[in-house]
Amino acid sequence: MQALTTWNAFKDGNALLLRNGDQALRFSRESRLVINLLGKTGSGKGTQGEELAKKYRIPHISLGDLYRNALLENTSLAKVIAFQANQGISYDVEEVGIGMLAKRLERADCDSGFILDGYPRTAQQAVTLNKTLLHPHDLQIPINLEVPDDLVIQRIANRFFCSPCQKQIREHIEIRHPGHCPDCDQPLTKRVDDAAKGKVESKLLFHHDTIGSILSALSQRDLIHTISCKESDSPQSIFSRITQIVNQTLDDRFKTVQYYNQVDNVA
Ligand SMILES: [Zn+2]
């Protein structure tokens, strides 16, 4: 087992500084830190994404949230998505997702990096991500959260939503006032997508059909890390496995940067 190292995040103006003892790596517009969480619906990407965003001080960009927000705002984009949904066309039409993500990444909070959740959903989107959305010096860490289907189905059945707070409540059992939001005490509902019969199953089928080609497209640029999650794994234990992968990747990045600095000095 490799020695454990811990990289901690600090803000340096618009840049992000990751420090491990006296070692430091700087991330900025042309070299961002991108943690890309992959996995089926209910695999824990959202929970992990929120925690990683706090730890690494970069925003959590959930494609699902971008779609839902677009639908709430009555924009022309929302009308396109709603039309497609009504026609039974998957809202994952390539250009809609890519356009929305590209626009979100232009905002200043993404300047030094971001956590990606729910993108790419197709091999074509993976190619676009690598070729056009990412810069050559960005450090992307793709992490595939593998969770058995039956566990996902069980989790989604226990997943509730508070519309006033726009918040997903995942551990319904632990709520003090059952059926009500722990923050505002309003009654909890199910997300339309979670409640619709057969929707979860069709999402899982889509995932199984596409994940292989997505991973293979992403691996053209970066090493894919896979975490196999069991029912007994707590979100905290998955989180520490993710940060271990991030720590090791940052170690490697530091060694590479050092090596090139030495080569530059000799030349
Ligand atoms: Zn609430």
Image (tube, rainbow, N blue to C red):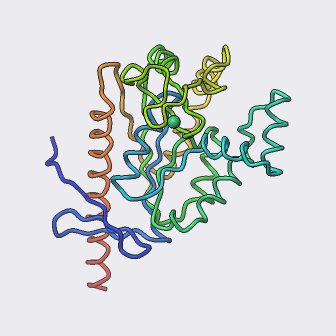
- Give the mark count: 0
185 or 82, which lies in front? 185
The quarter of the picture where residue 44 lies is: top left
Q: Quadrant of the N terminus?
A: top left
Q: Is residue 102 left or right of residue 154?
A: right
Q: Quadrant of residue 62?
A: top right
Asked if residue 56 lies left or right of residue 131, the reply is: left
Image quadrant in which the C terminus is located: bottom left
> Residue at coordinates 41% horizontally, 52% vertically from top-left?
53
Q: Position of residue 194 (x, y in %)?
A: 60, 23
**Residue at 52% from the left image edge and 25% from the top image edge:** 160
Horizontal side, residue 228 vs residue 79: left or right: left
Q: Is residue 134 left or right of residue 9?
A: right
The residue lying at 25 percent from left, 58 percent from top is 7
Instruction: Residue 173 in the image: state x and y as whole percent.
Output: 39, 19
Where residue 259 appears, x then y in whole percent?
A: 27, 70
The front one of 156 and 189 is 189
Given residues 50 and 243, the one toward you in this image is: 50
Picture layout, residue 44 above or below residue 71: above
The percent coordinates of residue 101 (x first, y second) are 63, 53
- Vertical relation: 218 (above or below) 191: below
**Residue at position x 83%, y 29% in the image:** 86
